[in-house]
Image (tube, grey):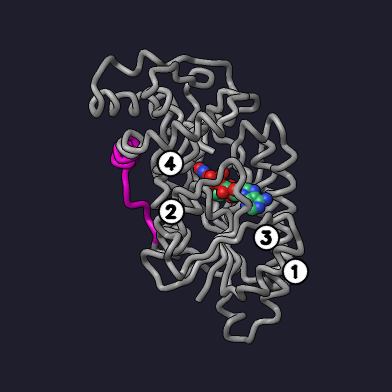
């Protein structure tokens, strides 16, 4: 059995590929055009695994995508390739629209043609799993019920609008053409190998370097956090056990204000590293335009229908993550020096 994982050189895609190869006998083809966000170091240990292959392909390239399906004849697709950083989408939305919307369209088109031509048994088992975000639902206020699969779409940033568009395309390919699709909408991820422009790794990096830790507004925006290895498990469980045409919300049951996440990281660093209190580095900066106030997920459907629940608490996961960044300073220091353009403070709330 063989699965195409798009965006497999990214933060979540690489965790998913490691999970699949470790826990199943499936083969994996990683389809990634290696943008600034790609990170092959996260897959280094798999380079010699005969069940793993990398295809450097831009999902916007219709012909290259069609050839991928012909070459590998996959039993399913898990689609993560995307432009993902909200701040970058505010500065320059072009790639967000072309990759997140048109790239998804090219995969649906080629995936559909491939699926239609499969023998019946394989056609029945085939899945096109689209990986999306809770940001498509817009924002919550304190006291609002959490997002679930019935929540109307109200995306607020160019990033979330492009992801919402791709979710709708996937829905349409199921409704109109019968393609056996799955959509998962997940809350903010954190963990090893996350590009240090996102909230948690950037906070750790700035604190370790003794530089000011920028916090948007007054830090009261609320996010739900999920460890990337828990997300990888959820994705594989949904891919294998989810029902075609369904969507599943995935969350970590860990809603926190940004300032509390940042303070927790500082406290863990005080304990792990010693030295002066890292909290003194926190600096409040002007808010991101259109900054969503709160996201929260009700994950009861995936728990009930797929049998997945998050395994780690945020506190356990944060401590492991801080320790990982302390051990892997060479990697993130090199990334910060070479690929972090610093146009904005880059202090996104997670994505
Ligand atoms: P990431 O930015 O770390 O990685 C994205 C990967 O996609 C990179 O390896 C990049 O090279 C690749 N890519 C980008 N454009 C491409 C193109 N045109 N063709 C081929 N490859 C391309 O992203 P991530 O944080 O791992 O997120 C993965 C997916 O999960 C995204 O679809 C994102 O919307 C979704 N998601 C992310 C989070 C989060 O907190 N990070 C939460 C929920 C959902």
Does mark 4 have its CB less than 8 Å from ligand 1?
yes
First in residue order: circle 2 vs circle 1: 2
Q: CA distance from mark 3 to mark 2?
A: 32 Å
Eyeballing the image, is 215 above or below 88? above
Q: Is residue 82 visible?
A: yes
Dot 2 corresponds to which residue?
44
Q: Nearer the viewer, mark 2 or mark 4?
A: 2
Q: Nearer the viewer, mark 1 or mark 3?
A: 3
Q: Is residue 208 left or right of residue 274?
A: right
Q: Nearer the viewer, mark 4 or mark 3?
A: 4
Q: Position of residue 157 (x, y in %)?
A: 66, 35
Dot 3 corresponds to which residue?
170
First in residue order: circle 3 vs circle 2: 2
Q: For residue 176, which numbered disc appears in the image?
A: 1
Cβ–Cβ below 8 Å for labels 2 and 1?
no
Dot 4 corresponds to which residue?
190
Q: Residues within 10 Å of mark 4 (few under 14, many from 20)?
A: many
Q: CA distance from mark 2 to mark 4?
A: 20 Å
Q: CA distance from mark 2 to mark 1?
A: 40 Å
Q: Position of residue 210 (x, y in %)?
A: 38, 18
Quarter of image, res 175: bottom right
Q: Nearer the viewer, residue 32 or 278?
A: 32
Q: Position of residue 165 (x, y in %)?
A: 71, 50
Residue that appears at 76% across and 61% down: 62
Q: CA distance from mark 4 to mark 3?
A: 26 Å
Residue that appears at 64% across and 27% down: 290
Cβ–Cβ below 8 Å for labels 2 and 4?
no
Q: Is residue 151 visible?
A: no
């Amino acid at each position: 059995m063989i699965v195409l994982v798009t965006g497999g050189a990214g933060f979540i895609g690489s965790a998913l590929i490691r999970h699949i190869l470790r826990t199943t006998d499936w083969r994996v083809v990683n389809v990634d055009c290696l943008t600034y966000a790609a990170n092959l170091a996260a897959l280094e240990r798999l380079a010699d695994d005969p069940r793993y292959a990398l295809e450097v392909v831009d999902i916007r390239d219709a012909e290259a995508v069609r050839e991928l399906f012909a070459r590998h004849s996959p039993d399913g697709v898990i689609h993560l390739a995307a432009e993902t950083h909200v701040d970058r989408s505010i500065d320059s939305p072009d790639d967000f629209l072309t990759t997140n919307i048109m790239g998804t369209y090219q995969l649906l088109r080629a995936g559909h043609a491939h699926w239609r031509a499969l023998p019946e048994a394989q056609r029945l088992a085939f899945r096109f799993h689209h990986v999306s975000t809770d940001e498509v639902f817009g924002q919550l206020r304190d006291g609002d019920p959490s997002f679930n699969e019935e929540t109307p779409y109200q995306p607020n940033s160019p990033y979330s609008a492009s992801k919402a568009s791709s979710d709708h395309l996937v829905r349409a390919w199921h409704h109109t053409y019968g393609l056996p699709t799955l959509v998962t909408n997940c809350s903010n991820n954190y963990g090893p190998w996350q590009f240090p422009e996102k909230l948690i790794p950037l906070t750790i990096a700035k604190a370790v370097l003794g530089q000011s830790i920028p916090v948007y507004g007054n830090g009261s925006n609320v996010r739900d956090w999920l460890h990337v290895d828990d997300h990888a498990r959820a994705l594989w469980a949904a891919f294998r056990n989810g029902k075609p045409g369904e969507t599943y919300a995935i969350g970590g049951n860990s809603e926190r204000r940004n300032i509390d996440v940042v303070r927790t990281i500082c406290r863990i660093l005080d304990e792990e590293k010693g030295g002066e209190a890292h909290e003194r580095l926190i600096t409040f900066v002007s808010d991101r335009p259109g900054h969503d106030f709160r996201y929260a997920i009700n994950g009861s459907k995936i728990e009930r229908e797929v049998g997945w629940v998050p395994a780690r608490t945020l506190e356990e996961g944060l401590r492991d993550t801080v320790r990982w960044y302390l051990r892997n300073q060479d990697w993130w220091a090199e990334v910060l020096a070479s690929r972090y353009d610093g146009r904005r403070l880059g202090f996104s709330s997670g994505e």
